[in-house]
Image (spheres, rainbow, N blue to C red):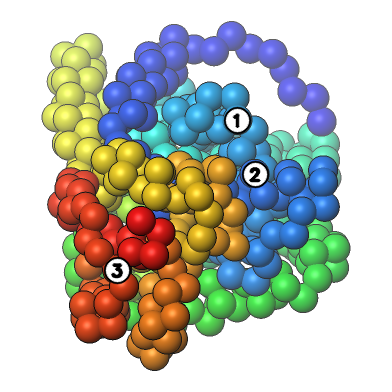
C-alpha cells in the first residue's frame, strides 16, 4: 500500500480554516463538562497505575469505551496545557475527520467538487463544531471510523486491496474499542467496501473483500477483549448492549437529530433519487447506505427512549451522509447553465448554514460553570475528609490534590445510605445543585436540616444552576 504525497487543495484548507476558527471560539467558553472531567481524571489515574502501581477504579466495567485508549492520550494534553490543550487535541482530531470526508468522497465519487461540498457541509454542522471543542473520546473514535472507511474505499481499485482492507479492519476495531457505540456503523463500512468494489471487481470479489474486512476487525477485537479481560465485557453490556431504557419520546429524539443534520440528510436523500433516475444502481445503493447512516444514531436512541449525548452521536452518521450530499450539489452544479453564478450562489448559501451550525453548537454548551464553586470548595477540602456532590468528576478534576477515594456522588438510589452517613458526620463537605439527582438532593437537604451538625456556608451561582455548599461544624 503506497500513499502518494499530494499538496492539500486550497478549498479544503479554506474549509479547515473556517472550522478551526469556529471551534476555537468555544474552547474556553466554559469550565469542564462532566464527561470531559471524567475521561481526563481517568487518564491521569491510568498513568499513575502504569507508572507507580496506584490502585484505581475499575473503569473498564462501566466506561462506554476502553479507558486505556483515549483517556491517557487526553491526560497527556491536559498535563501540557490543561483543559484548553485537551480540547484543542479534539479539534485536531476533528480536522482530520473533515479531511477524510474530502479524501473519501474523492475516492468514492472521483469528483473534487463533490468532495468540497461534502467537507464544507460537515465542517459547519453543530455537532462537528461542538466536538472540536470538547475533550472526550468522541472525536478520536470518529477519526478512526473515518480512516477505516477511507481505507475500505481504497480497495476498490484492486491495487494492494488486501493491505487496504487489513488497515481498514484494524482501524475499525480500534474505533469500536475507543467508543463501543461506533459498532453501529460497522455495517456501513462493510457496505462501503462491498459497494465501492462491486462495479469494477464484480459482486463475488466485492463480497469476499467485505467478508475479509469483517474478519480482520473481528479478530482484532477478539484479541483486545482477551487482553482486557471480563471487565470489558461487563462495560460493553452496561453501557451499550444492555442500556437501561429511558423515558424520552422517540419523536423528540428524531426532531432533535433533524435540527442538527437536515442540512446533510436532505441533499443526501436527493442524491440517492438523482442517481436512481440516472439508473446507476451500484452507486445508488452506495449513496443510499451513506444517507441512511445519518439515521442510525437517532434510531438507536429512540429505541431505548433516551436522548442522552445525542448531539455527539449524530455526527458519526452525518459524516457518511455528507459524502452523498456532496454528490447531489456537485451534480446539480454541473447540469445547470452559468456555472460560475450557480457556484457563487452555492457558496453564499453556506453562510447561513454556517451561522446556524454555530448558534446550535453554542446552545450545546449548557452545563454549569463551576469557577466560583471551585474557589469556595478548594479551602474546604484542603484538610482532608470525605466529600459528597451530585457528580464528583468535575470537582475532582479541578481539585487534583484530593483522591478519588474521598469523593462520593448522589447516584445511589438508597436514601438510608446517605442518612446514616450524614448522621455519623462521614462527609465533611456536601455540595448539592438539585440538577442531576433533584429527588435525592431534596432528601439529603432535609436530612441535613433535621440531623444537624452541618451549616450552609455558600450559595454559588453557576449558569443555570445554584450550588449549595454545606460544611461539617466539627471542622470549624
Tag 2 residue:
44
Tag 3 residue:
454
- Which mark is first along the chain, 3 or 1? 1
- The image quadrant where one finds the N terminus is top right
- The image quadrant where one finds the C terminus is bottom left
Q: Where does the image place residue 361, in percent across and percent down from the top left?
A: 26, 40
Instruction: Single out the mark in the foreground, 1 or 3.
Output: 3
Left or right: where 382 falls relative to 191: left
Q: What residue is drawn where x is 22% and y is 30%?
A: 354
Tag 1 residue:
79
Are dots 1 and 2 in contact, CB under 8 Å?
Answer: yes
Q: Quadrant of residue 200?
A: top right
Q: What residue is drawn where x is 44% and y is 14%?
A: 13
Determine the secondary structure under disc 3.
strand
Determine the secondary structure under disc 2.
helix
Mark sitting on residue 199? none
- Location of residue 65 with respect to 118 vertically, above or below: below
Q: Where does the image place residue 376, in percent across and percent down from the top left?
A: 31, 44
- Location of residue 181 with respect to 137 vertically, above or below: below
Instruction: Single out the mark in the foreground, 2 or 3.
Output: 3
Q: Where does the image place residue 207, in percent across and percent down from the top left?
A: 71, 61
For residue 294, say whether it is visible: no
Q: Nearer the viewer, residue 260 or 177?
A: 177
- Which mark is first along the chain, 2 or 1? 2
Amino acid at each position: 500500500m503506497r500513499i502518494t504525497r499530494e499538496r492539500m487543495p486550497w478549498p479544503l484548507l479554506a474549509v479547515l480554516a473556517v472550522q478551526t476558527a469556529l471551534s476555537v471560539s468555544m474552547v474556553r467558553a466554559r469550565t469542564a463538562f462532566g464527561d470531559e472531567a471524567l475521561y481526563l481524571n481517568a487518564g491521569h489515574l491510568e498513568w499513575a497505575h502504569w507508572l507507580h502501581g496506584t490502585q484505581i477504579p475499575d473503569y473498564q466495567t462501566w466506561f462506554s469505551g476502553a479507558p486505556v485508549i483515549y483517556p491517557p492520550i487526553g491526560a497527556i494534553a491536559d498535563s501540557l496545557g490543561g483543559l484548553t490543550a485537551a480540547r484543542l487535541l479534539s479539534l485536531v482530531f476533528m480536522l482530520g475527520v473533515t479531511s477524510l470526508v474530502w479524501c473519501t468522497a474523492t475516492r468514492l465519487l472521483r469528483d473534487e467538487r463533490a468532495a468540497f461540498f461534502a467537507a464544507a457541509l460537515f465542517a459547519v454542522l453543530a455537532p462537528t463544531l461542538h466536538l472540536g471543542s470538547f475533550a472526550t473520546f468522541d472525536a478520536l473514535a470518529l477519526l478512526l471510523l473515518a480512516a477505516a472507511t477511507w481505507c475500505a474505499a481504497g480497495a476498490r481499485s484492486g491495487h494492494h486491496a488486501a493491505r487496504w482492507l487489513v488497515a481498514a479492519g484494524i482501524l475499525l476495531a480500534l474505533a469500536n474499542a475507543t467508543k463501543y457505540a461506533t459498532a453501529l456503523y460497522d455495517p456501513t463500512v462493510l457496505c462501503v467496501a462491498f459497494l465501492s468494489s462491486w462495479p469494477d471487481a464484480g459482486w463475488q470479489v466485492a463480497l469476499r473483500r467485505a467478508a475479509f474486512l469483517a474478519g480482520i476487525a473481528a479478530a482484532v477485537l477478539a484479541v483486545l477483549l482477551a487482553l482486557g479481560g471480563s471487565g470489558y465485557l461487563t462495560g460493553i453490556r452496561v453501557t451499550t448492549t444492555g442500556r437501561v431504557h429511558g423515558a424520552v419520546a422517540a419523536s423528540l429524539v428524531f426532531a432533535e437529530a433533524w435540527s442538527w443534520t437536515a442540512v446533510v440528510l436532505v441533499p443526501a436523500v436527493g442524491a440517492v433519487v438523482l442517481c436512481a433516475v440516472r439508473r446507476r444502481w451500484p452507486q445508488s445503493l452506495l449513496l443510499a447506505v451513506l444517507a441512511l447512516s445519518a439515521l442510525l444514531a437517532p434510531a438507536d436512541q429512540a429505541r431505548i427512549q433516551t436522548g442522552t449525548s445525542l448531539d455527539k452521536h449524530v455526527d458519526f452518521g452525518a459524516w457518511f451522509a455528507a459524502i452523498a450530499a456532496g454528490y447531489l450539489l456537485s451534480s446539480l452544479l454541473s447540469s445547470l447553465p452559468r456555472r460560475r453564478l450557480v457556484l457563487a450562489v452555492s457558496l453564499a448559501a453556506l453562510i447561513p448554514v454556517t451561522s446556524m451550525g454555530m448558534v446550535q453548537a453554542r446552545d450545546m454548551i449548557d452545563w454549569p460553570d463551576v469557577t466560583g464553586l471551585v474557589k469556595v470548595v478548594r479551602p474546604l477540602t484542603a484538610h482532608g475528609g470525605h466529600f459528597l456532590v451530585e457528580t464528583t468528576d468535575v470537582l475532582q478534576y479541578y481539585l487534583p490534590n484530593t483522591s478519588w477515594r474521598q469523593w462520593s456522588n448522589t447516584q445511589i438510589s438508597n436514601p438510608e445510605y446517605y442518612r446514616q452517613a450524614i448522621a455519623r458526620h462521614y462527609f465533611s463537605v456536601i455540595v448539592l445543585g438539585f440538577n442531576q439527582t433533584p429527588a435525592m438532593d431534596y432528601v439529603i437537604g432535609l436530612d441535613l436540616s433535621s440531623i444537624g451538625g452541618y451549616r450552609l456556608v455558600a450559595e454559588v451561582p453557576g449558569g443555570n444552576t445554584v450550588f449549595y455548599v454545606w460544611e461539617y461544624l466539627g471542622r470549624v
